[in-house]
Amino acid sequence: MIRLSLADIAEAVGGRLHHADGTEIVTGSVEFDSRQVRPGGLFVAVPGERVDGHDFAARAVADGAAGVLAAREVSTADEPIPTVIVPELPEHHPNRVMALAGDTDGSGAAVLAGLARLARAVVDRLPDLTVVGVTGSSGKTSTKDLIAQVLAPAGETVAPPGSFNNELGHPWTALRADDTTRHLVLELSARGVGHIAALCEVAPPRIGAVLNVGSAHLGEFGSQEAVAQAKGELVEALPAAADGGVAVLNADDPLVAAMAERTAARVVLVGQSPAADVRAEDIDLDEQARASFTLATPAGSARVRLPLHGEHHIGNALTAAAIAMELGASVEEAADRLGGVRRVSARRMEVTETSGGVTVINDAYNANPESVRAALKTLASMTRGKPGRAWAVLGVMGELGDAEVAAHDEIGRLAVRLNIDRLVVVGEQARAMHQGASLEGSWGEESVQVPDVDAAVALLRAELRPGDVVLAKASKVAALWRVAEQLTEQVTENTATEQAGGHP
């Protein structure tokens, strides 16, 4: 973050100083986890479902924090703690609606609103900063990672870790920007209409990309049209074309392409459609389902070889290439940068080979019908024509509402149609997958239902053989990454930031 005094911060958030004269200078990062506070930083006391950050304010200051952003006074007679106290919020303020779990009195929402105002104040002080926003029902995190990587050679770039994309993660990431930052790449999530619009107020984007409108969160939104309404808030927030606004839209998704009518920004269409301005042509997949294609644009074309597993990454790569070219890259430079990207966020098409010769695909961070279909197609591609068997270990896809049974049934049937050799369905909530697979064709023991992760791991360890490929995929609640991690004996840390700051 840029250097600010506590007086500056109080003015930005509309708060008041307590046990501070305002001259204290914040020179470090802004943190909501007291364990991450470094000398000169600002500690944000967020009340949560399990702990209340106010209880850790003294520790943060003892560890060097220049001050605390809080909803109430945290000083004691023996411990004067320099604090900026945020104002209370009206009962129906949007931040109270969006507040994190455990916020029973609105104090957490008040702190988050203050954090948002502080982030906006910092972004407004960085005139050379370009804010890029990306949203969609699936692929946001992978695409955000690609965008950040292709922009980095052109200047200092800040992007969130993992799926750090909500009312806490969004301003926290924006506050990582400083005078040296040229690109701020943000992932925007929504649990309701109005959420993305609120996030756009925190760090107004100049370039916005919408990837797709799928069936994720149908239980919350009710329909794909409502999802589209929410996702399109990003392009509505962009500046007009004359002021540099650019909307990058997926030409292959009709609900996304239709958002061109909702923005004053210049529209760039990406996809495989002939209508796309930035297209993928002559697509080829290698034996590891890594795509090569010709990046075709009005300015010329170049060959791209993506080092990422899965054909679905082509659309993500086109979005990243379009944004890179909008910010000065040539077609050749964009293609070259895409060839050098790597997987950044954990548990997203993470491919590992075990010592026993089994390939494990850990794509278990989250799931919806669209992303599971893409993962199954990748699994089928990686095993086609090879002696090894394809194993799909699948769990529940959450938040589907009335579509839950039909969606799970369809995934089970798709596994059969794709010639997946074995389907292991984990958990009672996903039973319709097993039923769908069993009813499709002549499957018998090829599909099995197991109660939990331990049972799945025991089955796999007993039956896997060298050359087999195993996919683990489910919504976060199922924690199926534990299957992949036990098979590979690699335990990845699920960071506190991603837990607290992300939504699918």
Image (cartoon, rainbow, N blue to C red):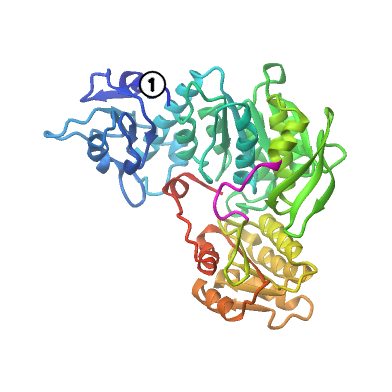
User: What kind of element bears circle 1?
Assistant: loop
From this view, report whether residue 291 is shown above or below residue 242.
below
In screen coordinates, is 380 left or right of 281? left
User: Could you say where residue 223 lies in the image, as x and y percent from the top left?
Assistant: 67, 50
User: Pointer 1: residues within 10 angstroms few (<14), some, or many (20+)?
Assistant: some
Please give the count of numbered marks on the rendered protein: 1
From this view, report whether residue 291 is shown above or below residue 58.
below
User: Could you say where residue 192 lies in the image, as x and y percent from the top left?
Assistant: 56, 43
**Residue numbers of the magenta segment:** 339-349
User: Could you say where residue 39 lies in the image, as x and y percent from the top left?
Assistant: 30, 32
- Whether residue 106 appears in this view of the structure is no
Residue found 29% across the figure and 23% down from its top: 16
Tell which residue pokes out farthest to the left in this image.
78
Quadrant for the N terminus in the image: top left
Question: In terms of image quadrants, where is residue 443?
Answer: bottom right
Tell which residue pokes out farthest to the bottom in this image.
444
Q: Amino acid at mark 1?
A: Arg
In screen coordinates, is 7 left or right of 425? left
Residue found 26% across the figure and 42% down from its top: 56
Q: Nearer the viewer, residue 499 or 137?
A: 499
Examine the structure image and report whether residue 37 is included in the region drawn in magenta: no
Examine the structure image and report whether residue 340 is included in the region drawn in magenta: yes
User: Could you say where residue 447 lies in the image, as x and y percent from the top left?
Assistant: 67, 77
From this view, report whether residue 188 is shown above or below residue 292.
above
In screen coordinates, is 209 left or right of 160? right
The residue indicated by pointer 1 is 3
From this view, report whether residue 339 is shown above or below residue 442.
above
Provide the major secondary structure of the magenta segment.
loop
In screen coordinates, is 235 left or right of 193? right
- Whether residue 192 appears in this view of the structure is yes
Q: Nearer the viewer, residue 21 or 183?
A: 183
Residue found 62% across the figure and 44% down from its top: 140
